[in-house]
Image (cartoon, rainbow, N blue to C red):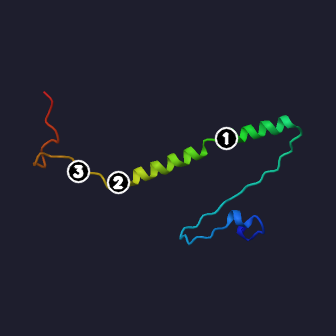
Amino acid sequence: MLSKLPVLGALFGQTGDESTRQELLILLTPRVIRNQNEADKMTSDYYELFKNVGKEIKLEKHKKATSMSNQGDQTPPQTNGNANAPSSPPKP
């Protein structure tokens, strides 16, 4: 566990009493970078790839919360007191 590592453990550990468990997965891929131009290109590629991730996560959480809250809000259609009557008057 990363929280057991000296010095770095404080970055990955927690001190609160939360009942949920979260894990952080770090994937390392070694790359050979031969010059500064390659380093700049790789950095800009990763920046472009991840710059909107936070916005997308917030959007997905919002969509999920909205869909869950709307499930209980469904109301039956109005029938004008008669179960066989149309819900709205016919158009002339």
Q: Is residue 61 above or below residue 48?
A: below
**CB of mark 1 within 8 Å of CB of mark 3?**
no
Q: Which residue is mark 1?
A: 49
Q: Amino acid at mark 2?
A: Gln
**Disc 2 from disc 1: Cα separation:** 34 Å
Res 2 → quadrant: bottom right
Q: Which residue is mark 3?
A: 76
Q: Is residue 4 left or right of residue 92?
A: right
Seen from the viewer's position, the closer of residues 89 and 28 is 28
Quadrant of the snapshot with the C terminus: top left
Q: Secondary structure at mark 3?
A: loop
**Between disc 2 and disc 3, whose residue precedes?**
2
**Between disc 1 and disc 3, whose residue precedes?**
1
Label at residue 91: none
**Disc 2 from disc 3: Cα separation:** 13 Å
Q: Is residue 41 above or below residue 76?
A: above
Q: Residues within 10 Å of mark 3 (few under 14, many from 20)?
A: few
Q: Residues within 10 Å of mark 2 (few under 14, many from 20)?
A: few
Q: Which residue is mark 2?
A: 71
